[in-house]
């Protein structure tokens, strides 16, 4: 490999061994990219891991979206249409985020499964739905649906981890094979102007790395088609991917420029300076995304225009709760062109803050059930979850940037020569940061998911309290809404605790259903937690 001649000193043996290892693993790696889909299918992992673009947050808001990454991620939106994707990022952050997120979201987050209920036979073939006709006490699926849900979910989990790992391996190969350095050389050949160099280098790096993940994402989309979660054609799907790449590369470019300014000004504190400068940019992205980014992927219209009756029902609920959310903050998203999933979410911040409901939700659920879904979203809105999510994201980013700063210097001291990267502000060092952020964001996933689950549970409680006393038999209505969502979205009937801990942005659906059905503080003479009506 190109770097052999440059290697000197005691690292020789280790370096040579690594190079040989990479050489040997390259065919395997390339093979994996193209053969993986077939291999997974052959093993019976089918299920889609994602509804591309529209996946589901399940009644939800964009868990990760509000996490603020959304900002970054907006590009990742396809994964969860609402913006659920996310981890942390930095300049490269952006880059990695956009991208790492994209896959995260894409691959996984979309559906939030449920777990088999205690009374439900835990083998495929649970209780016939007829039993639940009158009361929805447990999440139940027909045999066929149960098996599909399990296979589909498992395939998505596998793909999530494959995608994460693949990205890490690809970036390591880009460094080890000198590709990142070649990209830098190319950018420096094109112009002496730093701005133009960045304009060449950053998109080239981001799109190249993402290109290797494309087969995994395509496989995920094929699964979602097979499992009838997605109805989006391949052309439209690829166009969405292209738009995400463009947006992601654009945002990454801006952030990398800011990063370089921070590095020049403060070689030792750049991570902090960058954090201070990047947050407003990310916040701004988050702020404008409902107006300028989301419409690039889906069509939105005022809810009141198409469903005046539903809007009237919502106003009634809001009025009784003493809330003032203008109806022009409620939107309908035409999700049915791309997905069969049921979902809704809250996005934006400040003047752009809004509640969005997918048209599928209204078509597949009763009005009362839709009102409950709205109640959950309004919970996010009223409880300030977008704001909290962004603050949480900012804190994670702070830690991630500090670790990246330490990691970058450590890695360059160790492998800088092999990688032909000579200083932290070398363009090619962006690839190292990308690698570090990808690893950090992957490891932070459980933390992000846990934070999200707490907020999702709070929103469930809020929704239940909001509709109580207004919607007849409200607990049953909410439980049945979960039942219907789980059936349509092929929610995992029984996710393992580890998977839940790592990936679930929402509590497992079966748990949410059981909780909803049994939530009745009024009968016990207790005060509801969030929503008190006049006189209470
Ligand atoms: Zn939610």
Image (cartoon, grey):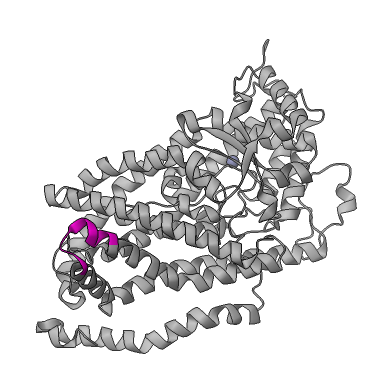
Question: Is residue 302 or residue 110 the one in the foreground?
Answer: 302
- In the image, taking residue 183 as reference, residue 155 lies left or right, namely right
Q: Is residue 511 left or right of residue 168?
A: right
Quadrant hosting residue 469: top right
Q: Residue furthest left?
A: 9
Q: Residue at x 63, y 51 (%)?
A: 508
Image height check: is 331 above or below 316?
Answer: below
Which quadrant of the figure contains the N terminus?
Answer: bottom left
- Residue 13 left/right relative to 466: left
Q: Position of residue 25 (x, y in %)?
A: 38, 86
Assess whether residue 197 is covered by the magenta stretch: yes
Instruction: Assign the C terminus to one quadrant of the image.
Output: top right
Kindly tell me whether residue 266 is visible in this rendering.
Answer: no
* Residue 407 at x, y percent in the picture: 23, 61
Q: Determine whether 50 is above or below 222 in the image.
A: above
Task: Residue 243: say if magenta.
Answer: no
Q: Which residues are magenta?
A: 190-199
Q: Residue furthest top?
A: 535
Q: Is residue 421 visible?
A: yes
Task: From the image, give the main secondary structure of the stretch colored magenta.
Answer: helix
């Amino acid at each position: 490999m190109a770097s052999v001649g440059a290697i000197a000193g005691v690292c020789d043996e280790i370096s040579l061994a690594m190079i040989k290892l990479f050489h040997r693993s390259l065919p395997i790696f390339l093979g994996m990219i193209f053969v993986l889909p077939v291999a997974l299918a052959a093993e019976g992992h089918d299920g889609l891991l994602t509804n591309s673009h529209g996946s589901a947050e399940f009644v939800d808001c964009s868990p990760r979206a509000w996490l603020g990454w959304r900002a970054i991620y907006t590009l990742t939106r396809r994964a969860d249409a609402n913006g659920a994707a996310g981890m942390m990022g930095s300049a490269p952050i952006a880059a990695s985020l956009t991208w790492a997120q994209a896959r995260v979201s894409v691959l996984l987050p979309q559906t939030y499964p449920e777990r088999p209920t205690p009374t439900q036979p835990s083998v495929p073939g649970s209780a016939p739905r007829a039993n639940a006709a009158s009361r929805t006490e447990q999440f139940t699926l027909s045999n066929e649906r149960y098996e599909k849900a399990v296979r589909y979910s498992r395939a998505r989990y596998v793909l999530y981890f494959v995608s994460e790992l693949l990205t890490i391996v690809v970036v390591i190969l880009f460094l080890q094979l000198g590709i990142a350095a070649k990209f830098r050389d190319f950018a420096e050949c094109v112009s002496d102007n730093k701005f133009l160099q960045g304009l060449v280098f950053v998109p080239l790096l981001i799109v190249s790395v993402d290109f290797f993940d494309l087969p995994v994402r395509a496989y995920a989309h094929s699964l979602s088609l097979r499992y009838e979660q997605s109805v989006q054609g391949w052309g439209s799907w690829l166009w969405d991917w292209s738009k995400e790449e463009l947006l992601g590369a654009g945002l990454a470019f801006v952030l990398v420029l800011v990063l370089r300014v921070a590095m020049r000004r403060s070689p030792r504190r750049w991570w902090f300076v960058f954090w201070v400068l990047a947050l407003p940019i990310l916040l701004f992205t988050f702020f404008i995304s409902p107006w300028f980014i989301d419409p690039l992927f889906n069509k939105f219209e005022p809810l009141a225009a198409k469903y005046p009756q539903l809007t009237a029902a919502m106003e009634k609920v809001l009025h009784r709760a003493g809330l003032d959310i203008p109806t022009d903050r409620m939107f309908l998203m035409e999700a049915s062109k791309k997905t069969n999933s049921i979902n809704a979410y809250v996005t934006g911040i400040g003047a752009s803050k809004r509640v969005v409901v997918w048209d599928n939700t209204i078509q597949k659920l009763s009005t009362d059930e839709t009102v409950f879904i709205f109640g959950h979203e309004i919970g996010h809105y009223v409880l300030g979850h977008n704001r909290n999510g962004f603050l949480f994201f900012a804190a994670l980013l702070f830690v991630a940037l500090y670790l990246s700063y330490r990691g970058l210097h450590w890695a360059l001291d160790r492998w800088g020569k092999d990688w032909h990267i000579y200083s932290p502000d070398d363009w090619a060092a962006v690839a190292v940061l990308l690698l570090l952020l990808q690893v950090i964001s992957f490891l932070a996933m459980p933390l992000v998911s846990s934070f999200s689950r707490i907020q999702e549970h709070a929103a469930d409680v809020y929704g239940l309290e909001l509709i109580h006393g207004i919607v007849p038999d409200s607990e049953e209505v909410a439980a049945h809404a979960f039942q219907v969502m789980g059936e349509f979205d092929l929610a995992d009937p029984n996710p393992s605790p580890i998977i839940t801990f790592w990936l679930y942005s929402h509590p497992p659906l079966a748990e949410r259903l059981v909780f909803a059905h049994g939530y009745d503080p009024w009968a016990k003479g207790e005060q509801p937690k969030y929503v008190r009506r006049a006189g209470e």
